[in-house]
Each structure stands twice: as structure tokens, then as C-alpha cells.
Image (cartoon, rainbow, N blue to C red):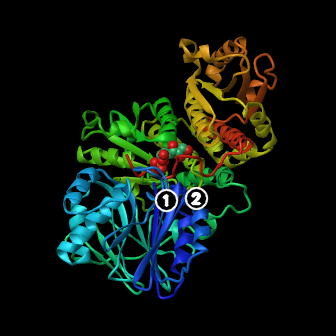
Amino acid sequence: MCGIIGYTTRKNNSVEITLNGLKNLEYRGYDSSGIALFNGDKIDIIKSKGKISNLDEKLKQHDTTSCCSIAHTRWATHGEPNETNAHPHHVGKVTLVHNGIIENYATLKEELKAKGYKFQTETDTEVAAAYIDYCYSQTNDKLKALVEACKKFRGSYAFNVLFEDEPTTIYATRKDSPLVIGYSHDGNFAASDISAILNYTNKYSLINEGEFVKITRDIVTFYDKDLHQIEKKSETATWDAAQYQKNGYDHFMLKEIYEQPKVINDIFDRFYNNCSYKDIDLTKYEKIHIVACGSAMHASLVGKYLLQTYGKIPVMVEIASEYRYSEELITPSTLLIVVSQSGETADTLAALRLAKEKGAYVVGIVNAVGSTIAREVDKCIYTYAGPEIAVATTKGYTSQVAVFATLALIAMEEKGLLTDEMSKTIKEDLTNVEKNINSVLENREKYLDIAKDIYKHNDLFFIGRGIDSSVCMEGSLKLKEISYMHSESYSAGELKHGTISLIDKGTPVISIATDDKLFEKTVSNIKETKARGSYSIFVTTQNHGDDFSEFADKTILLPKTTDFTQPILTVVALQLIAYETAKLRGCDIDKPRNLAKSVTVE
Ligand code: F6R
């Protein structure tokens, strides 16, 4: 949540470059933004409510010649998203931007008030600025002031800090929030992620927890927590700036939906050709715990189905914000799999740290290369889906499902459960996945047609059984988050235990039946809703025929594949229904209200 960037340069264009970088971080939060720039030896601060484009407009009325600036795009935690609460915050000699939460800010605020500090905002960040200023007044040493202040802060932070008496230098540090240092020809950066700087450089270094950095336009110096200077090697980013463009698509979400055939095919290709995780011994553990949030948790439920049904390994899936407080579940013989697109989600990270503390072995399924979760797990399986910019995940989710499919295959191999015939059928399926997803993506009209039927409704239901019931959860979340339509996802057999009372004349019900052995049962449940007047949208596979007029008003037919790819094909159809519906409702598809892509607070 929140994106920060700082840039110090030998030229006078730091504002333009900082602002361009900030735009690439807007997915992290977008309720207000602001920039602080050195104007000679004084610092100017310009802030604006709403999206960065508002700040951009405002900056046109200012002299923005500057060789050093820091900027912020906010997802509000403390205080409403107005201009006053927007970052940067300035107290005494200190101006800073912050991504994270200072949990003990209220206590520190009282302490500082007693010392004479006055506060203008409701934010925890202003308190952090005041505390650093106070420590600076005591030590007269900027790095020491930062170290001392950070010892006091509880919570998470990535800071870019300016001191009024040292124009052109940025100080930075982080704990539980990401920050990378970038090196360009004309100067140096500190930013929440590499996307902010890729237009200017692909050379970067990662800052570890508790390290401190002094950044001037000529040199970057790293220190450990005791302020001993440390050496860092620079790395070269493999993602390029073009991947951060819409490339002709109306939205990043649509572009990312259409990237799925290749992303998924690449995962299966790597699995057969140079798999780096076949050595994980899944059979050694009595039970596997899988922990994640949101869509990653939904992907984990599909993973559970595959690992249990085919790998015959008991699996427990838990939401990370609950698991992190369930230490009694974890023992040294636990295998924990954490799943995260961003690799920064605070609750998932906390769950992984707890499990490691308890001696468990932790595997990560992660997209963002070099992210905190990727670095802290015992073994990281990268999905390599490329940057995902739309706040609602699509290829992030399906790539996690694809990795679970490969893990289930590994478990089957290890347990001798994979017969030659099964192996052949599954391999054929995985080899055809690109073609099959492409066929679901063809003829977008049919999804638009369904969207036209449902977009004026306020409530909608998704029902399915078995693996389809997990996919329903993801379809429902996709629709809710981008179209703001309320929807619920139910196991089809559960509906009659209460929820069916909500089905009325015209209530849309999207039902999914791709599992042959559960087909008849699901159809019975659909008929139960139809009898109460539902508007029935039926998603099934081609092997069941094409006339479902008895109980379906609209039908989507998917290619019939194995369970190892079927959920991917199904969810792609649901992603497109959600996308077209949100578009008809005039929603901001890539940046839905109240959300942020990377959830680095608890
Ligand atoms: C929904 C969505 C979220 C994320 C969740 C976990 O479209 O994107 O539900 O799946 O916040 O994020 P990661 O995977 O980054 O840990």
C-alpha cells in the first residue's frame, strides 16, 4: 500500500522523473499524492487529493526546477484521504514519505507533544517525521537519528527522508515494506519497486530489513543497523519498461487476461524442461498448510483440491490473517506453502515468519522477483507471470493455479500414483493449454452479451461443486472488486441451507459444472434456483452437449480438459464476464475504489 520514490540527479529534472516514476506506482494506492522538492536550499511541498493526474495539473503552476525530490501515492490508513493527510510530511528539519504503518504512533505522539511538538495531521507518518527530527536534534547526525528513531517505531515502513540542511541527499530505510535502490547515468533512486525506475535504469540493489542508505547523485552508501558500511552488488532487472504499457489494450486488466495463454504455457514448459522445484519432497509431510490472502487464497483452494485428489496428500488452506495467529497449528514437521503475487503481502509474510520461527519448512509461490516473501522462504517457486499492474489479479491467479497443478503431478510421481496413461493424458493437456485458453478468449461478444444481462442487477450468485466451487469464489471476487456489484459464491449443495431465500424473480445465478461426476448434481441445484425464478447463466464443458435450454438462459461452453487446466479455462471466462460488466457500469477497472495492489499493512 502506498508507493514512494525519491530521485537525486546532476540535472534539474528530478520532479519530472520522480512524477513519471510515481505514475508507475499508482497501482499501490491512489487516493492522494504529493511531492517534496529542493528549491535551492529550501524544500517545497505540493500535494493533491485523488489520482496523480491531479498532482500533475497542480505542478504546472509551480517552478519545478529541482535536482532532488521525493514523492508518494497514498492508500489511506490513518486519516481521511485529503490534502492535509497526504504525504510528504514535514516536521522541523525533516521531510519524508512513508509506506507502511507506525503502529505505536499514538504513544510516540504523546511523548513528542510533551517535548513541544505540534501536529497538523491525523497520520502516523507525521509522528515518524517528528520523531526523526527529535532524534536529529539530539544526535546532530542524520544516520544516527534515523537508526534511533527506527528503534522506536513498531510496525512497517519504507522511508525516503530529506533533511533541510543537506540539499540533494536522500536517506532511506525499510522494514516490512519494499524499497529498491536504482542507479542511472544521471543520478540515483529509491523506490517501492523497480517499475518506478525502469524507464531510466535496469540496474538496482535490494535493501534488506533494517539497512540504511545515503543516496547522493554521485554515490549510494549502504549501512547495517549499527551503521557499519556494507557493500552491495547491483542487479539487472529482467522486466522491461514495455511490460508496463497497455500496448493497445483498453485496460491493463484486459492485457493481462490476454497474456495468460503464454504465461501458463511457459509454466508447464519449464516444468517439463528445466523444473527447479522437483526436489521438494511433498510426501515427507503428513499435512501441507497453504496460506495466502484474497485471490491467492482462492488459487490455493484449487491447489488443495489437486494435491488432495491426485497427490493424496492432506492439505489445509488458511487465510494468512488468521493463520498468523494460530501458532499451535505449526510444528517443525509442517510444510507451509505461502502464495503471493506481489511477494509483499503483510499477513502472508507474517505467517511465513511465524512458521520459520517454529521450525517449519516454507515454500513460496511468488510472482515478484526479489520480493520479501521470495527472499525469506526456504524455497521459492517463481510463477514468472511478468508485472501485473491491474489491481484485480488475473494472470497472477492462474499462474499460481498452474504451479499447483505441477506440484500435484510431482506428488503423484513421488507416490507412484502416476500411471503411464495418466501421464500421457495430462502431458497432452498441459501441452495444449495455450490453444485452449485462446479458444476461451475468442469471441468476446458472448461475455459482453452476458454482461448486458447482469450489469443492472445488484446481487448475483455463483454456484458450483468440487473444483468449480473454488473457481466460483474467484469469479465472485473478480466481479465484486471491479464492478462493485454484490455477489456471493456458494457450493451448489449448500444453497438450500438458507441462501436460496435470496433467489427471486430475475436474480442472476452463474453456475459452473465442469466436473463430469458432479454434473447431474449441479444441474439439479441450478433447477432449484430456476424454479424460484433465477436468470441462469451456465458454464460447462463441450462434452455435455449444447442444449441446456431447460434450465439455462445463457450458456458458455468450454473445451473439456483435465482438472490440471480446467479451472484455468473456467476462470478466464469469469474474468471476462467481470471485465465486461465493470466496463458497462463505467467503473475504473484497473484501479477500483478503496483498493491497492500490494497490501503491506495488516
Ligand atoms: C484480488 C487480488 C487480491 C490479492 C491479495 C493477495 O484481485 O488481487 O485479493 O490476491 O491481496 O495479494 P498477493 O498475491 O500479492 O499476496
Q: Which mark is residue 11?
A: none
Q: Is residue 299 visible?
A: yes
Question: Label 1: few (<14), some or many (≥20) within 10 Å?
Answer: some
523 sits left or right of 144 in the view = right
* Point 69% across, 22% down: residue: 507
Decide if ligand 1 comes within 8 Å of the CB at mark 2. Answer: no
Q: Give the vertical position of 328 relative to 279 (above or below).
A: above
According to the picture, the residue beneath numbered tag 1 turns out to be 83
According to the picture, the residue beneath numbered tag 2 turns out to be 51
Question: Considering the numbered disc 2 on the image, is that residue within a helix, a strand or a loop?
Answer: loop
Q: Position of residue 233 (x, y in %)?
A: 37, 76
Q: Give the vertical position of 137 relative to 66 (above or below).
A: above
Return the residue nearer the eye: 378 or 173: 173
> Which residue type does callout 1 highlight?
Glu
Contact? badges 2 and 1 (CB < 8 Å): no
Q: Residue 112 appears in which quarter of the rendering?
A: bottom left
Q: CA distance from mark 2 to mark 1?
A: 12 Å
> Which residue type does callout 2 highlight?
Lys
- In the rendered view of the protein, which quadrant contains the C terminus? top left
490 sits left or right of 316 in the view = right
Return the residue nearer the eye: 470 or 456: 456
Q: Position of residue 86 (x, y in %)?
A: 46, 59
Q: Position of residue 350 (x, y in %)?
A: 33, 47
Mark whose residue sits in front, 2 or 1: 1
- In the rendered view of the protein, which quadrant contains the N terminus? bottom left
Q: Is residue 565 visible?
A: no
